[in-house]
Amino acid sequence: MPSDWEICDHVSKGFVSNRMRVLGPGTGLAGGYLYVPPREELEDRRAALFRLSERRLVKVYEGPGWVVGLDFAGSIAWAVIATPQADGSGPDFWLLFSGDSGLSWREVGSIPARSITSVLAVNEKEAWVLGAYELMRTTDSGDTWQSVEAPGIRNAVVETLAKESGTVLLLSRGVSATRDRGRTWIEHALDGAQVCGVSGAIVLARVDSQSRIGLMASEDVMWIVSFDKAMIPFRVVVHGRTVRFLALPGGDDSGKGVLLYESTDNAKSWQGSLVSCFPTRGAIDVGPTGFGMAVDGEGHVLIRT
């Protein structure tokens, strides 16, 4: 374990973290489900949201199902819960809202989607959901939902929703951007790169077998650095001259944790470390200022201050 990570608490027994978001220095949210080992049937799962503050992880929501989406914008947060249908035909989806940085949650209602794998929080009225062949948004706090047509075919395995300065982004082979709630889109091909994350003008992507960091300008990208190490990058954050990104390692390190790469000189030089957390995207997050939180396979809550 890198020396700048430490154990600060323990998570509830049987908790599996599917989604994690750092809210700010010292605070964050973790969403997933609780089960009683050794049973892990879908109908036995209990959706759970935990909030980290002052080095303590406190459960702030519990209900049927499991968390499939979690995101925040300022002090508001949206979460999506999946619950199994009795006939086994697939899950139903439900929207949760918090207006106090995740301290308390309100059940809003159902989402008429066949598949949801992530949610994007825009503000207290607007949220987007992405799934297999599914892209929807609400602009009235979840009372109604509209399907959104966007370039390409929705594939939640390789697509990600993001937002930058009032623009909603669909990250896939390149970047598609909308400023008018999905009525029109501007496409940026970015050399056909598989874009994994965006923060400001910084782009995190995969090109062939390489992971790359680039600088996006207009409709083009200038690649700054390439990494030959086997990995699947999935999150990038920028603060001043510092760039950080997370990646699932491949090769000999596969299954051993999550990689954290950090540059403090505008992406010119890099240091990488392996965080010994549960080896999934939903078990770790890092914020722009460097605070990180994670959960390992033994239920330890790890923080990076």
Image (spheres, rainbow, N blue to C red):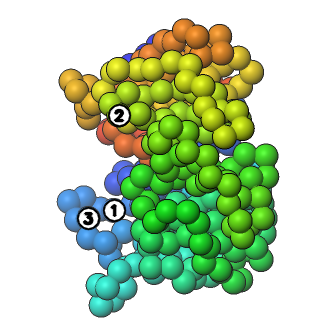
Which quadrant of the rendered structure holds the N terminus? Answer: top left
- Which percent across, then down, holds residue 112? 54, 83
- Location of mark 2 (residue): 208
Residue type beneath disc 1 = Tyr
Whole-number angstrom distance, CA of label 3 to CA of label 1? 6 Å
- Is 239 placed above or below 196 here? above
Q: Earlier in the sequence, mark 2 or mark 1?
A: 1
Q: Residue at point 42% right, 68% down?
A: 132
Front residue of 207 and 6: 207
Is residue 81 visible in this depiction of the protein? Answer: no
Helix or strand or loop: what does disc 1 sit on? loop
Is residue 239 visible in this depiction of the protein? Answer: yes
Q: Earlier in the sequence, mark 3 or mark 1?
A: 1
Residue type beneath disc 3 = Glu
Q: Which mark is residue 272?
A: none
Front residue of 37 and 235: 235
Front residue of 113 and 51: 113
Front residue of 26 and 166: 166
- Which percent across, then down, holds residue 114? 44, 79
Q: Which mark is residue 35?
A: 1
Marks 3,1: beta carbons within 8 A: yes
How would you rate the neighbour count of disc 1 (Cα within 10 Å): few for under 14, some for 14-19, many for 20 or more? some
Residue type beneath disc 2 = Asp
- Location of mark 3 (residue): 40
Q: Residue at point 40% right, 78% down?
A: 91
Q: Residue at point 61% right, 46% down?
A: 188
In the rendered structure, the answer to whether residue 135 lies left or right of residue 18 reads right
**Tag in front: 2 or 1:** 2
